[in-house]
Image (cartoon, helix red, strand yellow):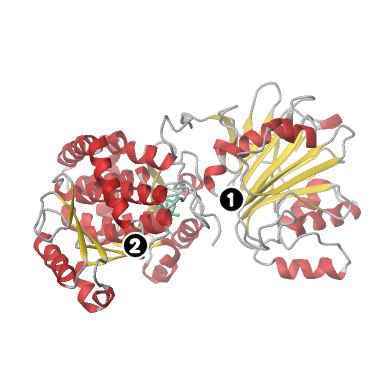
Amino acid sequence: MCGIVVYVGRKGDGAPAVVLEGLKRLEYRGYDSWGIAALDSRGRLATLRRVGKIGGASADRVTRLLGSGSVAVGHTRWATHGGISERNAHPQVDCKGRVAIVHNGIIENYQELKAGLVARKHRFASETDTEILAHYIEEGLARGQSFSDATRSIAKRLKGRSAFIAMDSKGGQIAAVRLGAPLIVGIGKKGEMFVSSDVNGFLERTNKVMYIDDGEMALLSFGKKAQKAPEFLNVSRGTKVRKRIIGIDWKRERESKLGYDHFLIKEIMEQKHTIAQAINQDDAKMRQVANRIKNAFGVFIVGAGTAGRVCAAGEYLFSDIAKRHVNSTVASEFSSYRHYLTKKTLMIAVSQSGETVDLLDAIDVAKSKGARILSLVNVFGSTLMRVSDDFLMLNAGAEKAVASTKATTAQLSLLTLLAYATAGRLKEGKRLLLNTAEQVNDMLNPRYEERIKRLARRLRRSRDVFIIGRGVNYPIAEEAAIKLQETSYIHAHGFAGGELKHGPLALISRGSPCIALVANDDTKHETISNAMEVKARGGYVIGVAPENNEVFDYWLKVPDAGVASPIVNIIPVQVLAYHLAVLRGINPDYPRNLAKSVTVK
Ligand code: F6R
């Protein structure tokens, strides 16, 4: 979703071009418009706002329009308040053209705050909630407040999760305020300073960071009164906060597609090694975490979207492997369980980005009841990692395509291993999963992909696709539907095989494609029977299974991976989703209306 990049350098450093480069690195998060504010050669605020993709914008053009000064603030916007238009893109400025704002998240009480400004005759240039910040700071400055106090005054009144940057072009200061949405300061060479909502926004230039915590702001100065280092303040009290510079060892992933046409297929193929990476965990730490699970009084596994389906699979895995009851729920519904939470509850939060707002809100609920948080997360330094009591890294490397693939199987692998550790069978779990990783490596060969491509050609004009699974493959059927929906825009519906006869069977007609996810376990025969029920109504049955069966019209062979069947069963559907997108002329990396990191409710 929205992204922020700020650069403060030296004269002639070409700040707008540096910010443009950083914004391009945040493209994967999903956005619909973008903009940059900078100081022109006479120290006046100049802004540029555009609708559409930033990929085509050249550094030369941005430099021609905004100059090559030392300070710039940039933003990629995913529309929430106000349509997708240049006037609603950020930066937004105040009536006097002095203060520029870029903002992530939502100001829940903006209507009430805006009403006061309208009554005081401020002119609004956009429909955004963001713009009110510029006008409130303008009022504070007019009243004689310092820039930092004016910024704090309005920041204290905001409701909802957000983060914003305010730049005072006249006073030579930038405030970076964190109120529940991520912001990180980067310290570069020779006085260079960065701020971004995602470390990828500046990691190409520095890996030295200073974390802004919630309820804090960083003040960066430029121009005549420039200071070499940022100053950190508590927003409500205005008191100084001491910070350390931390070197992060999250190696920047090579962002090239490595010869692949899209990130999505590159990331699908990377599963040849990411499964093994996910389970490359310290044994002592795994046992310690397993003990916490055993000693907890109530365990909840929580995630959103695809991660939510992984959590549901986790419930089956813990039952099957560790004979333990754990509850799973999607993050946006977690608060309904608050009455069952105590200090002895353990919440296992599962996330690729570590920034999903529904999950962070769920954590607030769990923490308010004193529950302990363990997270399984891919992005190092993410908010989730920082608010958790314990964390395990997924080690999947940067995932750029909006549709999650390698992070999904990393999550499944790590949850499976945790279940084994909880059962006191860690070594056995590692052996099984390493074997699965090798089987996936063999499976993902060009002939296999070609076979799936042939199936994609057969399905490319389908209106609906049904997916069935039982046991642990039931949530995987739902995940398969998410993958097909978001990449190919074909209506896909995943459900438990046993539920077919309770409704969905009415939708099956001649040629309706139905994917049956079959595992070599005690659900196998019943899943095959359900596939037969589909076939008897004229459906076209695609079997994802270790063995062929007469009911399958098309067979996608997967290795017999035992309890790791969810990992191997989802992969052919990921490849199918990719090829369907390509055949239907859709960019598989950036589905419409979706974002990689979902930072609004
Ligand atoms: C779908 C997908 C999303 C994410 C969800 C949670 O392919 O990727 O459904 O799983 O938005 O994101 P994270 O894992 O970053 O919390």
Of the two numbered discs 1 and 2 on the same chain, state the one appearing first in sequence: 1
Q: In this view, does 84 lie to the left or right of 259?
A: right
From this view, report whether residue 59 is shown above or below residue 410.
above
Asked whether mark 2 and ligand 1 are closer than 8 Å, the reply comes as no
How crowded is the residue under tag 1: few (<14 C-alpha within 10 Å), some, or many (20+)?
many
Three-letter amino acid code at the position of disc 1: Tyr
On residue 370, which mark appears?
none
Nearer mark to the viewer, of 1 and 2 = 2
Q: Which of 148 and 485 is in front in this view?
A: 485
Q: Nearer the viewer, residue 576 or 88?
A: 576
Helix, strand or loop status at disc 1: loop
Q: Which residue appears at 43% of the width and 60% of the height?
A: 366
On residue 31, which mark appears?
1
Q: Is residue 468 left or right of residue 373?
A: left
The location of residue 354, given as percent across then percent down, is 46, 48
Q: Is residue 439 left or right of residue 213?
A: left
Instruction: Using the rendered view, name the quadrant where residue 475 is placed.
Output: bottom left
The location of residue 389, given as percent across then percent down, is 42, 47
Asked whether mark 1 and ligand 1 are closer than 8 Å, the reply comes as no
The location of residue 301, given as percent across then percent down, is 34, 57
The location of residue 318, given as percent across then percent down, is 22, 55
Three-letter amino acid code at the position of disc 2: Ser
According to the image, label 2 marks what residue? 462
- Location of the C terminus (image quadrant): bottom right
Instruction: Using the rendered view, name the quadrant where residue 80 is placed.
Output: bottom right
Cα distance between the residues tagged 1 and 2: 29 Å
